[in-house]
Amino acid sequence: MKPMGPLPPEFAGLDGALTIGGRRAEDWVAEAGDTPLFVYDAAIVAARVARFRAAMPAVDLHYAIKANPHPPLIAVIAPLVDGLDVASAGELRLALAAKPAAAISFAGPGKRDDELAIAIGAGATLNVESESEGARALAIGDRLGIAPRLAVRVNPDVELRGSGMKMGGRASPFGVDADQAAALVRKLIGGGADWRGLHFYAGSQALDAAAIADTQDATLALAARLAEAVGAAPPLVNLGGGFGVPYFANDRALDVETVGARLTDALGARAAILADSRFAIELGRWLVAEAGVYLTRIVDRKLSHGEIFLVVDGGLNHQLAASGNFGTVVRRNYPLAVASAMGAEPEETVSVVGPLCTPLDRLGDRIALPQARAGDLIAIFLAGAYGASASPTGFLGHPPAAERVSG
Ligand SMILES: *Cc1c(COP(=O)(O)O)cnc(C)c1O
């Protein structure tokens, strides 16, 4: 038997039939017409936003929509946050449907000229990732007769300790190295840009509050040094994010209140040149991961060499991350449950596998569950971030999963 990650607190106390947003899992499936299905509980997302606001009241909150770009979910989140962060012209289009352009920023290496032109024309902020991208943005602004709104993304000389994905402190396709950033900002201002500030992003999926706070302290100090070197105050300093969620056994939820207290102190003591700057944190996963449940029905139950397999109708084609093939080195179990038997004692050790003809399609590896039969629903939790949009939906030709937002 292998361990599973913890059920999110909102579902951990349920007894009997799983409910999501006050509605039974089977009723969600009936309404959607079939399994597999993602359901996102808007109330859980709103509670995360409220918790963030209470922990760091002076800081803007941005939603990084790559975590979950389902348009009805973006529509729920957009009014609750101060900004939307996008990483393609496609995401920009989704964001513009939900928020004014002035509240949207566009990061990512390899922005094409047509993407730059769409963003500049719309009035969104571009987080410039290189000197040549900055030059292209200025030229396109000239051609359109618009002063482009440009921020500079800095490859920070700090990294986020313990984060699942490090994106700072080393050679990187993201941003310009810290020692080149001030010169680029001066060049952009000199070239007629509307300079919006500085963007930092040091890593993702961090659960250690002290590590996040240390990174934020170092980022603030770097922002102050760069502002001094530019000789101007950045209107906005985007401090990045990287707040993680507990996916696996022994993961502990991030203590956001400690992060907030340390950041509030650090901002209170910030350098004079940042006195009038605003500060933002951009979050994807932490806002939406725990709000999502992936529901899939057992098609077959079989025994092989003494191991029980529950074969379900959904798999890594919809929820790659739960199979352990999205950004993890060692395969570990996401939290799973039999939707009709929440809170019931485990009775047997089973593996939950999807319908794809590859051994990678394993959603639960030798986990302890209550007895389940063909026809029962399996719920896979932590499915709200990097699920439907981060999975190879074309692989093996099964239909896409439906998506629903509660509330
Ligand atoms: C992916 C990404 C995010 C969101 O990361 P999460 O781990 O989902 O919070 C935020 N900012 C940037 C620049 C990113 O690339």
Image (cartoon, rainbow, N blue to C red):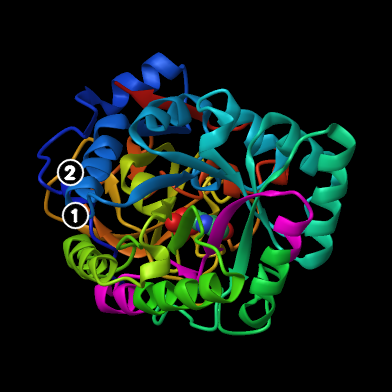
Horizontal arrangement in the rendering, residue 22 relative to residue 248 (left or right) = left
Horizontal and vertical percent position of residue 242:
42, 64
- Indicate which label's residue lies in the foreground, 2 or 1: 1
User: Disc 1, ligand 1: is the CB inside 8 Å?
Assistant: no
Visible in this render: residue 68? yes
Q: Please tell me in which quadrant of the rendered image residue 178 appears.
A: bottom right
Q: Is residue 250 above or below residue 297?
A: below
Horizontal arrangement in the rendering, residue 216 relative to residue 51 (left or right) = right
Give, as a three-letter code, the residue at label 1.
Ala
> In the depicted view, which residue is nearer to us: 261 or 76?
261
Pick whichever of labels 2 and 1 is earlier in the sequence. Answer: 2
Horizontal arrangement in the rendering, residue 335 relative to residue 296 (left or right) = left
For disc 2, the marked residue is: 10
10 Å crowding of disc 2: few (<14), some (14-19), many (20+): few
Q: Which mark is residue 147?
A: none
Which residues are the magenta region? 187-214
Give, as a three-letter code, the residue at label 2.
Glu
Report the number of discs.
2
Q: Is residue 20 magenta?
A: no
For disc 1, the marked residue is: 55
Horizontal and vertical percent position of residue 381:
33, 48
Q: Residue at x 45, y 69 (%)?
A: 305
Horizontal and vertical percent position of residue 310:
41, 50
Mark 2 falls on what kind of element? helix
Q: Residue at x 46, y 40 (%)?
A: 83
Visible in this render: residue 205? no
Q: Quadrant of the N terminus?
A: bottom left
Mark 1 falls on what kind of element? helix
